[in-house]
Image (spheres, coloured by chain):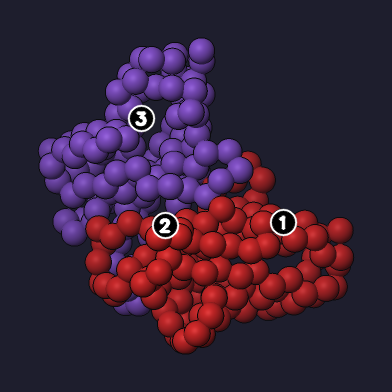
Chain colours: A red, B purple
């Protein structure tokens, strides 16, 4: 059973370009979370999605950032018109079916390292 | 969001036990205590979780105080591969399900 897959592993963009980060959750998982980690800092929650729905986007910047988790295919984190401050590691995590459970563990991918030149 | 407090860093010798403390004085009755760790250049990985009773698994043990306001992650014999950032997290429900909020964690250094 493959784990959470993120690609690309490394992404280099110039200022003003778009970055698209992909996350394929574990098989059977319908809940996806995105986190951002700046160098030497902890993980910051960005957004929580269930298939075709955004459940909580309280950690997403108001502009340039968007996320989706379509019925078919991976979850996508999209950053438009990237700036140098967007350079960070972006991690995706997934979990199983239950919507209201506090004892279920998250499975994380290896992350995408975004570098903005 | 429910908060946890951990020391910034700790040091251990290889083959010795390590006790990583965590304070969570605002914990409520239904909040589970989770521990994750992040090895260098990797995503976090689950270590252990518990509610009230102490828990053991192949990776570690979790000791939870009787009032649940603190807990301790115990690595019985530290190895160099245990060098990582350890996060203590309260998993709390909210209207949309729940989310996992990470603090700064404790960076564990293991000396050979």
Residue name at image x 13 percent, y 42 percent: B53
Q: CA distance from mark 2 to mark 3?
A: 22 Å
Q: Residues within 10 Å of mark 3 (few under 14, many from 20)?
A: many
- Horizontal and vertical percent for residue B61? 25, 33
Quadrant of the image containing the N terminus of chain A: bottom left
The dot on residue A107 is 2
Residue name at image x 48 percent, y 28 percent: B81
Q: CA distance from mark 1 to mark 3?
A: 32 Å
Task: State left or right for residue A68 relative to residue B98.
Answer: right
- Horizontal and vertical percent for residue A103? 25, 58
The answer to whether tags 1 and 2 share a subunit is yes
Q: Please indicate, yes or no, whether residue B67 appears anywhere in the rendered image.
A: no
Name the element at disc 3. Answer: strand
**Of tags 2 and 3, which is closer to the observer?**
2
The answer to whether tags 1 and 3 share a subunit is no
Residue name at image x 18 percent, y 59 percent: B30
Which one is nearer the viewer's eye here, A77 or A3? A3
Quadrant of the image containing the C terminus of chain A: bottom right
The dot on residue B20 is 3
Q: Residues within 10 Å of mark 2 (few under 14, many from 20)?
A: many
Residue on which the image places disc 1 = A10
């Amino acid at each position: 059973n493959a784990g959470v897959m993120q690609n690309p592993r490394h992404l280099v963009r110039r200022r003003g370009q778009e970055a698209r980060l992909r996350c394929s959750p574990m098989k059977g998982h319908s809940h996806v979370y995105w986190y951002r980690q700046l160098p030497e800092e902890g993980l910051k929650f960005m957004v929580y999605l269930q298939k075709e729905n955004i459940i909580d986007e309280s950690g997403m910047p108001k502009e340039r950032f968007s996320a989706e988790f379509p019925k078919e295919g991976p979850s996508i984190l999209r950053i438009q018109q990237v700036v140098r401050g967007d350079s960070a590691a972006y991690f995706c995590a997934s979990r199983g079916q239950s919507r209201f459970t506090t004892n279920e563990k998250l499975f994380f991918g290896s992350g995408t390292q975004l570098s903005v030149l | 969001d429910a908060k946890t407090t951990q020391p910034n860093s700790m040091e251990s010798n290889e083959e010795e036990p390590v006790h990583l403390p965590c304070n969570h004085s605002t914990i409520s009755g239904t909040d589970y205590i989770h521990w994750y760790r992040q090895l260098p250049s990797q995503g976090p990985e689950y270590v252990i979780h518990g509610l009230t009773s102490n828990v053991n698994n192949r990776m570690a043990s979790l000791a939870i105080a009787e009032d649940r306001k603190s807990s301790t992650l115990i690595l019985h014999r530290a190895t160099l591969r245990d060098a990582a950032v350890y996060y203590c997290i309260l998993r709390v429900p909210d209207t949309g399900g729940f989310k996992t909020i990470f603090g700064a964690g404790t960076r564990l250094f293991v000396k050979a």
